[in-house]
């Protein structure tokens, strides 16, 4: 079982503020790292698939970076909005996904 | 936008009963998966399926579990004799290939009583 850790477990952000959180994963035998956004009662929404060290991907106000040598990825939310409230999951892909426990973001208006 | 669909959304079953959870993956996808999340725990991998056979399974996926692709569109997970600890949200997922984005359904919430 691969150890994928996310921190913090939860955070509260004021609307308009930016925030970021971490996913750490085994740095050996890296294949890909996935980020998902998951709202209650909905399916996890795929945000990014990251494969290359130094990769930076962006989708609207959300972006992610990847460091495969040290085994971490950051997810950034710029100018948080209430609709960004969700649990953000990262998953290490070695032909199956090993998920972290998620970071639950609550954006206060 | 194509999506993975799952039925039922919620099922309550008695311990020892058989349960079949159904999924319709995205139509041009070749890889199919089942994951589950027990309340309060991480999402866990159960099984992956490719070319009409299991390609990988976790230690959770014991003899009580089976998967099938009975026709060109459905992908099912069967739990032969449910236990209390099988209560979880079960997610079906599919992808075009093993390195691409994996798309998830909304989940089937199974409660074993």
Image (cartoon, rainbow, N blue to C red):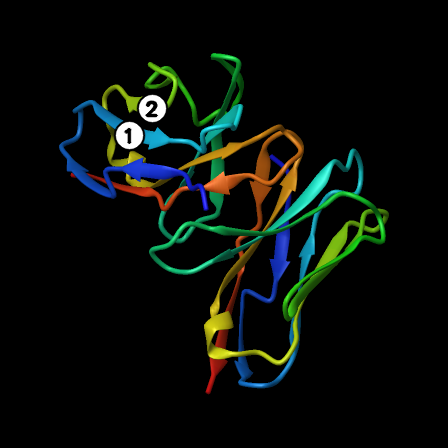
Q: Which is more N-terminal, label 1 or label 2?
A: 1
Secondary-structure class at tag 1: strand
Residue B90 placement, left or right of A81: left
Secondary-structure class at tag 2: strand
Residue B17 placement, left or right of A109: left
Chain containing the residue with disc 2: B
Q: Residue at x 30, y 34 (%)?
A: B86
Question: Farthest residue in the front direction?
Answer: B1
Dot 2 and dot 1 residues touching (CB under 8 Å): yes
Q: Position of residue A10 (x, y in %)?
A: 52, 69
Residue B7 placement, left or right of B59: left
Chain containing the residue with disc 1: B
Q: Position of residue A65 (x, y in %)?
A: 76, 59
Dot 2 corresponds to which residue?
A: B76
Tally of numbered discs: 2
- With respect to residue A62, does B49 lie above or below? above
Dot 1 corresponds to which residue?
A: B21
Depth check, front residue: A64 or A13: A64
Give the number of the disc on residue A73. Answer: none
The alpha-carbon separation of the residues under discs 2 and 1 comes to 6 Å
């Amino acid at each position: 079982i691969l150890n994928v850790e996310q921190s913090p477990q939860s955070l509260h952000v004021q609307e308009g503020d930016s925030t970021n959180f971490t996913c750490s994963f085994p740095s050996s035998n890296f294949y890909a790292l996935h980020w998902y956004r998951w709202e209650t009662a909905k399916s996890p929404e795929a945000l990014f698939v990251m494969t290359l060290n130094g990769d930076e991907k962006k989708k609207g106000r959300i972006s992610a970076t990847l460091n495969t040598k040290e085994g971490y990825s950051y997810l950034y939310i710029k100018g948080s909005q209430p609709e960004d409230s969700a649990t953000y999951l990262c998953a290490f892909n070695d032909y199956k996904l090993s998920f972290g426990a998620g970071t639950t973001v609550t954006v206060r208006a | 936008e194509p999506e993975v669909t799952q039925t039922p959304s919620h099922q309550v079953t008695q311990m020892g009963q058989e349960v079949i959870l159904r999924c319709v993956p995205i139509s041009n996808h070749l890889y199919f998966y089942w994951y589950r999340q027990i309340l309060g725990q991480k999402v866990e991998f159960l099984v992956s399926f490719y070319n009409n056979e299991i390609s990988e399974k976790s230690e959770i996926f014991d003899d009580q579990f089976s998967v099938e692709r009975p026709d060109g569109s459905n992908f099912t997970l069967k739990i032969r004799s449910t236990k209390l600890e099988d209560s979880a949200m079960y997610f079906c997922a599919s992808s075009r290939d093993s390195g691409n984005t994996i798309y998830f359904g909304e989940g089937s919430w199974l409660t074993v009583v």
